[in-house]
Image: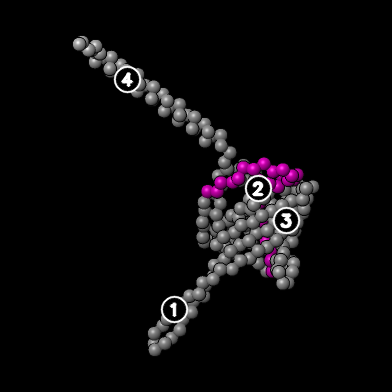
């Protein structure tokens, strides 16, 4: 029996053609993947918690949800939140996500272990309500003397501070969105207590230029 002989150059040509096909396929796949990533709605924001001495920052993925009833375009905005409670004043960066959650950013006040919130605005776009819950860690060192031996221990505990912000939505003479109102501590025993005032000014244009 005679077996048909295939020249070596034919094998080389087939392998070369196959490699070209694979290379072109990989290139096409790369460009398709790049296009998908490029057109995915994603806003990267440098968001963290900080005071004058400490800075913790991270990249936050902001939900891309279309607002349905926010007539004054409150959703998807960055604000400078100024809180005035008792004799204490603080400024905090916040973002009002279109899914009605609040992202809490940098602050010059006490640094919370965790902070989260929700917000809502009336259907006519004028009345605003926001709740922010902050969690803090605290501890106290205790030193005792016993037979000339010093024993040091610490008792750590966590506590929560929740504030409700109620105010009116308006615009400055320059057209900047502004929210002003009062801060409340709603206690199950003592009820609704007004504890201070707040102002929120839209800083979105400053961030995105």
Query: Which residue is the site of mark 4?
Result: 16
SS at mark 4 in the image? helix
Pointers 4 and 3 in contact (C-beta within 8 Å): no
* Location of residue 11 in the rendering, given as x and y in whole percent from the top left corner: 28, 17
Instruction: Give the extent of the magenta segment.
Output: 59-86
| Mark 2 → mark 4, Cα distance in angstroms | 54 Å
Neighbour class for label 1 at 10 Å: few (<14), some, many (≥20)? few
At label 3, counting other C-alpha atoms closer than 10 Å, the crowd grade (few under 14, some 14-19, many 20 or more) is some
Q: At numbered mark 2, what does the secondary structure look like: helix, strand or loop?
A: loop
Q: Residue at x 57, y 43 (%)?
A: 43
Q: Which of labels 2 and 1 is toward the front?
A: 2
Residue placed furthest toward the right? 124
Most distant residue in the front direction: 1
Looking at the image, which is closer to me, 3 or 52?
3
Quarter of the figure with residue 73: top right
Q: Is 33 part of what is drawn in magenta? A: no
């Amino acid at each position: 029996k005679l077996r048909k002989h295939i020249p070596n150059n034919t094998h080389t040509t087939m392998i070369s053609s196959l490699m070209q096909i694979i290379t072109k396929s990989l290139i096409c796949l790369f460009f398709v993947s790049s296009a998908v990533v490029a057109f995915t709605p994603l806003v990267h924001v440098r968001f963290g918690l900080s005071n004058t001495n400490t800075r913790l920052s991270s990249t936050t993925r902001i939900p891309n949800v279309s607002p349905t009833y926010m007539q004054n375009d409150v959703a998807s905005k960055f604000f400078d939140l100024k809180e005035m409670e008792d004799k204490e004043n603080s400024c905090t960066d916040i973002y009002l996500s279109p899914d009605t959650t609040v992202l809490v950013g940098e602050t010059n006040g006490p640094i919370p272990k965790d902070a989260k919130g929700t917000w809502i605005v009336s259907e006519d776009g004028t009345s605003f309500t926001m709740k922010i819950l902050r969690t803090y860690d605290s501890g106290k060192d205790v030193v005792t003397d016993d037979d000339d031996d010093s024993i040091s221990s610490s008792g750590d505990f966590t506590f929560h501070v929740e504030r409700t912000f109620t105010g009116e939505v308006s615009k400055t003479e320059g057209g900047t969105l502004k929210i002003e109102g009062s801060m409340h501590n709603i206690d199950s025993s003592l009820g609704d207590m007004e504890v201070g005032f707040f102002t929120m000014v839209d800083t979105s244009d400053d961030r995105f230029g």
